[in-house]
Amino acid sequence: MKKFNIRGQEFDKLVFIHLTKTAGGTLKELVASEASFSPLFVYNLNDWQQYDRQQHNVIYGHPDTWLYGKIGESLDESHDRLAYITFLRHPLTRTISHFYHLVHVDRGPVGERLRSYKDINEFFAKDYHWEFNNYYCKVFSTHSNLRDNQDFEQRVEEARDTIQNKLSFVGFQEYMGLSLLALNSMLNTELRIGSSVNLGSYSYQGISKETLKTIILLNEHDLKLYKLAHRIYLGNEFLKSNGVF
């Protein structure tokens, strides 16, 4: 089975962390069509139970109990060397996009609750959903319960450590083409997209300043984390060292 050499380190497998509304659906299609990949797509516990380390060299999925608190580590007792990869999006636009995604697509209790409000402004004035509040810091910490804010200062520091030391690559939805150039150079792959990524059919024009301020305050630490990731993974030194130019 193919090994992956990333910046002088050899890895047995790749783990793509699909964070909601960061062009993960687009990237999933590219991973599925890459000839050198034998992927397992994990979107629930039943999917994870299908993992076969002899067959799969790529794991791709939403963070769930199979991943919580384990980023940067082996996911089973094999001690396979795993390279963790993810894509981010500006926390403000990701939160807005996620809100409308849940309103239009989610048929469970969360979607029903969001649809009970007149619009996005009324929701953020009166209600709360954990995925709209420093989501990146929660996912990238070692805490096993993402939905609460317990020990949050520690979570922020753990998330910063994950971005700097436990991820092999971070791409950006806003710079998808450039990110894929770097990723393809690192992995010797042919992950290619068309000229644009779906940005959604909703409008920003009806979002009030008060709502934007609320979303920014809810994502204060994610904004700092996003800026840190930008500095590391979009800097000239990183791009040059990975053969982009």
Image: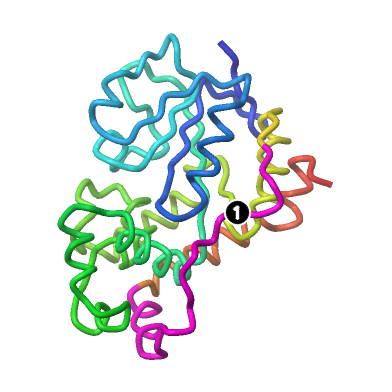
Residue 125, given in percent of the width and then of the height, sits at 24, 84
Residue 174, given in percent of the width and then of the height, sits at 61, 60
Magenta span: 192-218
Q: In this view, does 40 lie to the left or right of 110?
A: right
Query: Of residues 157 and 231, which is closer to you in this image?
Result: 231
Circle 1 SS class: loop
**What kind of secondary structure does the magenta stretch mostly adopt?**
loop
Q: Quadrant of the N terminus?
A: top right
Residue 72, given in percent of the width and then of the height, sits at 42, 37
Residue 120, given in percent of the width and then of the height, sits at 32, 77
Which residue is most to the bottom? 209
Tell me the amino acid under the disc marked 1. Val
Examine the structure image and report whether residue 205 is included in the region drawn in magenta: yes
Q: Residue under label 1, please give it.
A: 197
Q: In this view, does 16 lie to the left or right of 121?
A: right
Examine the structure image and report whether residue 194 is included in the region drawn in magenta: yes
The residue positioned 73% from the left and 43% from the top of the image is 181
Query: Of residues 142 and 198, which is closer to you in this image?
Result: 198
